[in-house]
Image (cartoon, grey):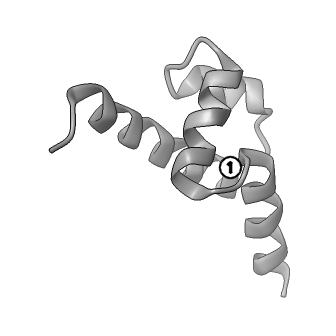
Amino acid sequence: GTTVMQWLDGIRINHAQGLLRETNLSLDEIVARCGYWDKSNFIRKFKRIYHITPMQYREAAHSSRVQ
C-alpha cells in the first residue's frame, strides 16, 4: 500500500538517519547526498517519520552514544 515516492522517501530518510548518526556532515550536505533539493521538504518528511527534526535526532543519537 505504498507509492513509489513513499518507498523512495523511506530509503532516502533511512540513509539520512545513518549520516546524522555517524557523521558530522552539515544538514545541507546530508540533504544533498540523500537526493533532496529542498531542505524544508526534507525536514518535514524526516519529522513525519521520526516525530523529531533531523538535528534533534542527531543530538539524541550523539548523547546516547556518550552515556
Q: How many marks?
A: 1
Please, is residue 50 above or below residue 46 in the view?
A: below
17 vs 9, nearest the viewer: 9
Seen at 21% across and 40% down, the residue is 2
Outermost left residue: 1
Seen at 70% across and 23% down, the residue is 40
Please, is residue 51 above or below residue 34 in the view?
A: below
In the drawing, does residue 64 fall left or right of residue 30?
right
Q: Quadrant of the C terminus?
A: bottom right
In the drawing, does residue 19 fall left or right of residue 14?
right
Outermost top residue: 37
15 vs 5, nearest the viewer: 5
Residue 4, x across and y down, in percent: 22, 28
Please, is residue 20 above or below residue 7 in the view?
A: below
At mark 1, the secondary structure is helix
In the drawing, does residue 66 fall left or right of residue 15?
right
Seen at 71% across and 46% down, the residue is 54
In the drawing, does residue 45 fall left or right of residue 27?
left
Residue 6, x across and y down, in percent: 32, 34
- Label 1 amino acid? Leu
Disc 1 residue crowd, few under 14, some 14–19, many 20+, Cα 10 Å: many
Seen at 75% across and 24% down, the residue is 28
Q: Which residue is mark 1?
A: 20
Residue 58, x across and y down, in percent: 76, 56
